[in-house]
Amino acid sequence: MEEMVRSIGFVCPECGAPEQRQLSVFAFSGGMTEVHCRRCGKSKTKIIRNGDRILITTPCIICNERHTVMCSAHDFLYEPILAFSCVNSGLDCCYVGREDIVKMGLHKLIDILNAAGDEAEQKANRTVLKETILFEAMLQISDRMDRNKVRCECGAEAWDVDVRGGNIDIICGSCRGRLRLTAVTMEDLEEISAMEELCIPKGEGDR
Ligand SMILES: [Zn+2]
Ligand SMILES: [Zn+2]
Ligand SMILES: [Zn+2]
């Protein structure tokens, strides 16, 4: 007769490694069982049998706390899969069940974690790019100012510059005419670079 085993899976919050262990059901016949992260040894899932109940305390990769859940010993030993979720995020943080299904669960969890990491990185990159474009555009504009290539239809030669979001407004100091330049994408920047002169349309004075 095939020995009955249960698979326990979690992702170690200390080192990020997925940990999956096969344990004979006899390991859960009484007392406490611990499953340590084999890579760093710093985190562990604790399983405590108390009569018909099983208490599981597991580290959580998502919020870095420990979560304690309870289930019936029957479910623990016979359900194909039990997914215990993080109370703070609702995402799974620990699986108990059949080896192949626990493995799939861990893969899914790792994918979610990787996607979340990539998104944060992409967001940071986009922010850096935006700031670089805005900065380059400001350099271009100040270069035109240095070379007296900024003028207003009203003939004045004093202006204010107002930067908001991805928009750079050059405002005539006399008629308050406004030239808006958008500097968000690389195309915007190319367009600004190509402008030999910046001409402010005449405004209607302070309103
Ligand atoms: Zn670890
Ligand atoms: Zn959590
Ligand atoms: Zn003007």
Image (tube, rainbow, N blue to C red):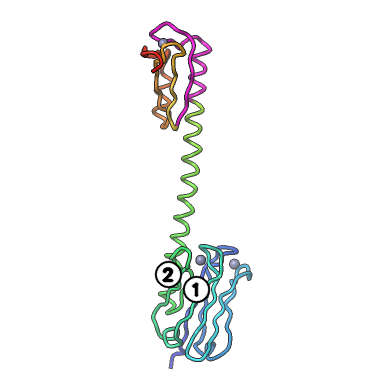
Start and end of the magenta stretch? 137-164
**Label 1 sits on residue:** 9
In the image, residue 108 above or below residue 28 = above
Left or right relative to 85: residue 44: right
Q: Residue at x 43, y 22 (%)?
A: 169
Quadrant for the C terminus, please. Answer: top left
Mark on residue 145? none
Establish whether ligand 1 lies closer than 8 Å to the Cβ of label 1.
Answer: no
Q: Nearer the viewer, residue 178 or 15?
A: 178
Q: Position of residue 69 (x, y in %)?
A: 49, 77
> In terms of image quadrants, where is residue 187?
top left
Question: What amino acid does circle 2 point to?
Answer: Gly
Q: Earlier in the sequence, mark 2 or mark 1?
A: 1
Q: Is residue 198 magenta?
A: no
Q: Is residue 143 magenta?
A: yes
Question: What amino acid does circle 1 point to?
Answer: Gly
Q: Mark 2–mark 1 contact, CB under 8 Å? A: yes
Quadrant of the displayed image that contains ligand 3: top left
> In terms of image quadrants, where is residue 197?
top left
**Label 2 sits on residue:** 105
Q: Nearer the viewer, residue 90 or 37?
A: 90
In the image, residue 193 above or below residue 89 = above
